[in-house]
Structure formats: structure tokens, C-alpha cells
Image (cartoon, grey):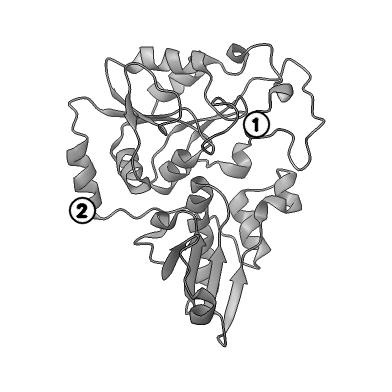
Amino acid sequence: MNIIFSIQGGLGKSVVATAVCKAIKKKYPNCKLIVITGYPEVFTNNKEVDMAFGLGQEAYFYSKYIDGQEVKIFANEPYLVTEHILNQEHLIETWCKMYGLEYNGEMPSVELNEREKLFYSNKYQTEKPIFILQTHGGAPQQDTKYSWARDMPRNVINAVIEEFKNQYTILHVKREDQFGFEHTTPIQESFKGVACLVQRSQKRLLIDSFCQHTAAALNKHSSVLWISNKPNVFGYSLHDNITANPETEKPDLRFSVFSKYNIVGALQEFPYKTETDIFNVDRIIQSVIAQ
């Protein structure tokens, strides 16, 4: 039997989906698991996945894997399930239940081969230990480069860089269109390249984006900042999950439908007087020191 697991959304969602693949293979151990995703590199060397296709790369897919064959299609959207909208359970659990799968605390997994690890170790040689910093997430070409609902406030970034710049090589995971910062090295690598660096790193300060899922997949305890999203839904107990301070202003939620806040950081929804009110910087620095 072919099980076709179609994943819509960003890179982090595909990393999360590797945990669902484990649950699929537990229930259907003899199936051929075929993944369709925007990020097929996430699934390379994954022992649960037989094939992974990138979106738009599925030439003759119906003829090869569906027509006239025993098949199950897993292509529903977990973000629109009641339990997810109400923040009642982890996304992985919701995703499993949606397909009638038993959830037993499955975690994401990312497989790195020795050649990948050696290549990126040689490419990023440093005398100081590595500190991985991810400050911004989301899709390219957003209306605003900074999303207050997800991204790291500038006062936090500046304080953390100042605290650790002399002891660590700070590798800043970012796209070319995102902000850069002094005393950091910008990292614009493939997914596997970033994963190799996360595995090598000694300290990590992350937001709710693909790096925190990757760190969990590699069993790397990290400090993770949370503003609009909830760690019980998207996070992992492995990490030190630092939630935002209580809101100080009443937001305008006229456009909210299935979530309180738009993850792109709609300006009228900002629930603080200033960005410096969002986090306790000392709490964050102590979390990173304790790693």
C-alpha cells in the first residue's frame, strides 16, 4: 500500500512532520510512505520515508503511485482542527489523531550522514565554541521585516550579542532579506547545512521557527522565545521555553479568525507599549548561560 503524506507550509512544519511519519510507519509498517513537501531535503536518509518529492516535481505522480493501486492519502490541514485552534494539544498529536494514528510522544528526527557533518565542519572552522542565533522567521517578502508576534526584539538581540560575542562565534541563521547584526556571522545555508551547525553548537537562542524544531530533532537543549504561539502546541519540553511578558495594551483583533494574532505581526494587533516590554532580557541571558 502507498501512503501519500502531503505537507503544506514552511520548513519548520516539514521538520515537525517527521514525527508524524514515525506514527504512520508504526501503524502501517509495510506501507510505502511517499512524502510531498516544499522541503524534501528534510526527509533525506529518513528511515521511515521511502520517497520525498518537492512541490512541483511530481511528474506523472498520479499514474505512478495512485492510479489502480492500494493507496491512502494524508493531505488534511492540522492547523484547522479544533484542538489546534484552541491550543489544547501539541501539533504532532493533532496531526496523528487526524489520520487515526496513535500518538506516543513521537519527536521529530533529522538524519545527518558523516559526509555532511565533515563538510560543514570544515567549512565553518572556528577557534571559539559555536553559538547559534535565529532571530527572525517567516516567509520572504513580508510587508514588515520584523514580526513582533514571532521575531526576537532588537533589545534582546543586542544584549545577547554583547554578552556572548567574546566567548563564542555567533552564527546568525538568516535569509539574505533579513536583518544582520555586528559581531555575528550570517548563515544562509541549506537545511542540512544549518542542521549540521546546530548539532555542532554549544549554545542556541532561537525563536519559534525551523531551528527550534531542528534542535529538538537533534536532541540539542536550547533557549526558545515565544510570543504569539504557544510552546505546548509547537514546542518541546527538551528546551527552556521562555514566554513573553503579560500584555500591557489592548490589541485590535478585528481581523482575527482562527488565531488571536497573525504570525506576520499585524501592526494594529501589537499588545505592548514598546518592544522592550515583550521579554525579560536577564531571564533570557541566564537561560543561555545555563545550557
Quadrant position of residue 204: top left
> Which residue lies under the disc numbered 2?
115
Image check: 86 left or right of 240?
Answer: right
Label 2 to label 1, Cα distance in Å?
38 Å
Is residue 138 depicted above or below 280 in this figure?
below
Name the kind of residue labelled 1 in the image: Ser
Label 2 vs 1, first from the N-terminus: 2
Is residue 194 depicted above or below 254 in this figure?
below
Name the kind of residue labelled 2 in the image: Arg
Q: Position of residue 64 (x, y in %)?
A: 48, 80
Other residues around mark 2 within 10 Å, as few (<14) / some (14–19) / many (≥20): few
Q: Residue at x 30, y 39 (%)?
A: 197
Q: Position of residue 100 (x, y in %)?
A: 66, 68
Disc tally is 2
SS at mark 2?
helix
Instruction: Indicate which disc residue 228 carries.
Output: 1
Q: Residue at x 73, y 46 (%)?
A: 85
Q: Position of residue 6 (x, y in %)?
A: 56, 63
Residue 1 visible: no
